[in-house]
Amino acid sequence: MSANLDLVRSIYAAWERGDHRSAEWAQPKTEFVVVGVPEPSSLTGVADALPGVEAWLSFWDDYRVEAEEYRELDAERVLVLARVSGRSKGSGVEVAQRRASLFHVREAKVTRLVTYWDIDRAFADLGLTPDTGNTGT
């Protein structure tokens, strides 16, 4: 297992414990991208991204993230397939969805994090199929 895969696993371990605010794993100028939502976004820097994370978390009761699969794509990229779930504070509706996150890692820090709300889109963008690049599970 590579150091990059270890790093990404540690990030998800924190998220699975509910720690979504810690970002010591990111470079100060890390790019955070969200793909496949009505208003896609791209922010540079932890200081700019953290308020968005806080706002997102404020909409949910019992928001959870659970990694299902890790795929080390190359020397700098790790793809994680995960399940997110929670209950909307406003409507009380329970939500459970699969998502994909692509971590770009250089020198033991994440330089770019792309979150895909549609796993099929992640596979298409990365030229993968559900059965390709399956390592580090």
Image: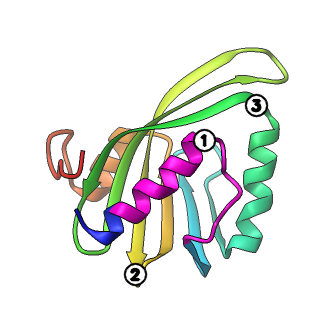
- Can residue 102 be seen? no
Name the one closer to the observer, 24 or 36.
Answer: 24
Q: Name the residue nearer the viewer: 13 or 53.
A: 13
Q: Residue furthest left?
A: 132
Q: List the residue tagged with mark 1.
A: 17
- Of marks 1 and 2, which one's residue comes earlier in the chain? 1
Residue that label 3 marks? 60
Extent of the magenta region: 6-25
For badge 2, the amino acid type reads: Arg
Residue 23: which quarter of the image? Answer: bottom right
Q: Quadrant of residue 65?
A: top right
- The amino acid type, in three-letter code, at marker 3 is Trp
Inter-mark Cα distance, 2 to 3: 32 Å
Q: Position of residue 134 (x, y in %)?
A: 18, 48
Left or right: residue 99 compared with residue 47: left
Question: Going from the N terminus, do you reach mark 3 or mark 1 first?
Answer: 1
Residue at position x 48%, y 72% from top?
Answer: 110
| Image quarter (top left, top right, bottom left or bottom right) of the C terminus | top left
Check whether the beta carbons of the residues at disc 3 and disc 1 lie within 8 A of each other: no
Tag nearer the camera, 1 or 2:
1
Relative image position of residue 8 (x, y in whole percent): 42, 59
Q: Which residue is mark 2?
A: 106
Q: Quadrant of residue 44?
A: bottom right
Residue contact at pointers 2 and 3, CB within 8 angstroms: no
Residue 34 in the image: state x and y as whole percent: 56, 55
